Image: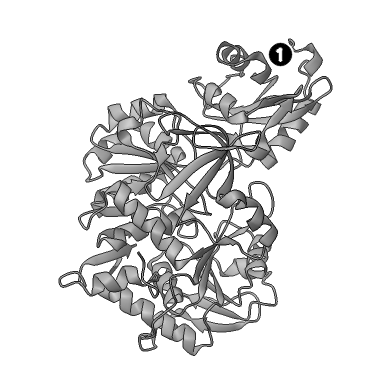
Amino acid sequence: MLAPQTNLTTILSRQAAVPGGRDRPAVSCAGEERSFAELDERARRVAAGLVAAGVRPGDRIAVLMQNRIEWVELLFGIAAAGAVCVPISILLRAGEIAYICEDSGAAWVVADERSLPLLEELPAGVETVVVVGEGEPPVARSTFGFDQLLAADPHAGPGPGRDDLAIIYYSSGTTGKPKGAAHSHAGVLWNAIGQVVDIGLTADHTYLLVPSLSWAAGFNNLFHSVLWVGGRSVILPSTETSIEDTVANLETSAATHSMLVPTLVRQLLDRPDLVERVRGTELRWVLCGGEPIPRSLIDKWDEGLPGVQLAQAYGMSEFPTIATILRPEHASSHAGTAGRAMSHTEIAVRTDDGRIERTGEGEVLLRSLAVMRGYHGNPEETERVFADGWFASGDRGLIDADGFLSITGRVKDMIISGGLNVYPREIEEVIYRLDEVTEACVVGVPDEQWGEVPAAVVVSEQEGWDGAAVIPHCREHLASFKCPKHVIVRAEPLPRNPSGKVLKREVAPWAQSQLETSTQPKPAEVPNAH
């Protein structure tokens, strides 16, 4: 059980107090390294500097920075001051940044030289900008340098309690305006503890962190967990995002663990030279999330990297960030699933007739001590998603008799064609079995006869491929009413949010416009599929 005053700073203070542990390396980035004692002290200096500058418990501080070691010092410093961190992705535009600042009530923004130009539309409520590095904000605000914060004596206060708010993660906005998932210190720590237990992390492990620290997966997938047990984390700078950079850092960091999105996994496996280099590293375990990895890719991984275990995870910004895990020993036998629930998580589904079941198909429900407190400033949506005492994920899934969860799509993505429910994810999984397909996305488009029909948008790296094989292939594996009625081959990659999820709200109108201007047969001329 977490003590009342347990908070994020506990991760550092407990390791800094362990004999022989205080001088152990905790984190490094771009050649800079901090031991547990150094990181703890610098975070407490940041906290003291913030308090001296007027920050009070509960104040929101938005952080807009690339991956760098100061980001870590800020997160723990904000926590020690009792303030609330609001991470913002540097991939967003000025208007999107302004929205998050205003919605969260942030009075402070921390930015580095790369992100300062993005502050041109700051709302009036942002009173102060803290600059990391060189530069000036493009709008008139009170300005502090990060070094000024570090000049204070370390903050010695007790810090916030376990139930106080620690961080607000804004969703990627795949279906509309981003919502702020508000997390307590206890929720963040339960999320970390669950990963320590289920993944088996120890002080001997080193984690190479590839995602942006502004994403929920950045700090909350393995990073906090590795620090919790006294291990080391190496942060990949935001300027080094290619698969070549990732492999180079695996070679120099002695990392045993890492997290790679499916896109990077594919890029790695397409490069035999890089696979050979990874074989010579200390890497032994990789976590992959965002979308299921097809069996063909798993087989390719096992053949090329037999000494590196590949696990897959399903989670969300509302937490747990790893709610279910497909362990390496189940990767082949249960390919396409998201695995079983982590030990700190319960899963169920709400069936179409409203029953909550531990097996079956419906909307995926979660219960965990790590789940968010609610959506910031949105009590109606909070009440809706926590109906019946479960968190409603918005994902549709199937839990089999052995407890393995398969994500079949988003509840709102469901296509109703001729009165029948069609789930895009099921179709996409079948399309991905074609070797020529690099990316696939199924969306609903209007149809005079059936109301709505599925259309497949596919991307292929094979020159001249026209997609003609998609519909016959689907007819071999799916009921006729589920098969796409249109196939559109797209030259550009599918649009994705910063977390790597396909933006179907952009794909659907694009697909419809392509069909309206194409010369292909009208839907009525396509063989009846119902």
Quadrant where the C terminus sits is top right
The image shows residue 22 at horizontal and vertical percentages of 21, 72
- The quarter of the picture where residue 261 lies is top left
The residue shown at (78%, 15%) is 521
Kind of element beneath mark 1: loop
Residue closest to the eye, 78 or 520: 78
Q: Is residue 296 above or below residue 493?
A: above
Is the residue marked by circle 1 packed among few (<14), some (14-19), or many (20+) residues within 10 Å? some
Q: Amino acid at mark 1?
A: Ala
The image shows residue 77 at horizontal and vertical percentages of 42, 76
The residue shown at (29%, 26%) is 303
Q: Is residue 364 above or below residue 474?
A: below
Q: How is the image coloured?
A: one colour
Q: How many marks?
A: 1
The image shows residue 206 at horizontal and vertical percentages of 26, 54
Q: Which residue is mark 1?
A: 529
Residue closest to the eye, 357 or 14: 357
Residue closest to the eye, 31 or 230: 230
Residue 522 visible, this orientation: no
The image shows residue 299 at horizontal and vertical percentages of 34, 25
